[in-house]
Each structure stands twice: as structure tokens, then as C-alpha cells.
Image (cartoon, rainbow, N blue to C red):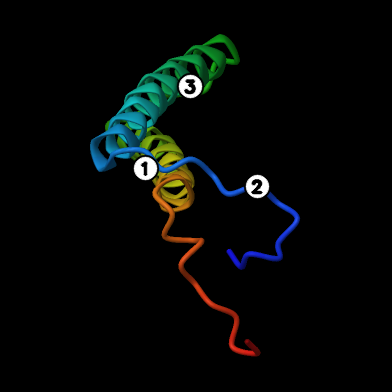
Amino acid sequence: MSSDSPLPASPQRSGSTHWRHFRRLMAFMTVLALVTIGLAVASLRADGVPFHLHFMIAMGGGIFVALLLAGALMGLAFVSNRSGHDDKVNDIDD
């Protein structure tokens, strides 16, 4: 950030702290994805939907990959911001 910015500079932490937060977020997202898959299966079973192996693989895999990808992208944005990489980007007009 430039020195005339009204926003305070974010505190710089060690690199391992950022990645520890990222791993914690990914562990949470993994648990959340597994719980979501369980809830989806339970809901569909309660509705009487017929289950086949390929349906289970596609549904579970889709939910799992989508939630982990969302968590990874969100976590990497947080790592970039906390580590100061976002502050190092200069505006082209300066």
C-alpha cells in the first residue's frame, strides 16, 4: 500500500503462520464437505431416490471437489493478503 492510504497496514506475520491458517481452513472444509455429502445422501434416501454406484460417486465427488476448491481459493486469497503480497502490488498510474 502507498503511504497516503487511509487504511492501516496489515501486520506482517511469519510465513508458517499463514500456511498453518490455510491448512486449518482446508481441514475444516474437508469436514464440512463430508458432512454435506452425508446430509445429501440422507436427504435423498428419505425422499426415496434410487441409488446407483455411479450416481453416488458423481454426487459425492462433485460436492467434495466444489467445496474444497472454494475453500482453497478463499484460503489462498487470505494467505496472499496476510503475507503482504497484496500490499506489494503497485498501481500502474503511480
* Residue 5 horizontal side relative to residue 65, left or right: right
Residue 36 - label:
3
Query: Where the N terminus falls, by quadrant?
Result: bottom right
* Residue 61 horizontal side relative to residue 6, left or right: left
Label 2: which residue?
A: 8
Q: Is residue 55 above or below residue 6?
A: above
For marks 3 and 1 on the same chain, the one whose residue lies earlier in the sequence: 3
For marks 2 and 1 on the same chain, the one whose residue lies earlier in the sequence: 2
Q: Residue furthest left?
A: 16
Find the distance from the CA under tag 3 to the CA under tag 1: 12 Å
Label 1: which residue?
A: 65
At a point 38% along the width and 35% down the height, the residue shown is 64
Dot 3: few (<14), some (14–19), or many (≥20) neighbours within 10 Å?
some
Find the distance from the CA under tag 2 to the CA under tag 1: 36 Å
Q: Is residue 37 or residue 27 the one in the foreground?
A: 27
Residue 35 - label:
none
Q: Disc 3 residue type?
A: Thr
Q: Are marks 3 and 2 in contact (CB under 8 Å)?
A: no
At a point 51% along the width and 61% down the height, the residue shown is 87
Query: Where the C terminus falls, by quadrant?
Result: bottom right
* Residue 54 horizontal side relative to residue 82, left or right: left
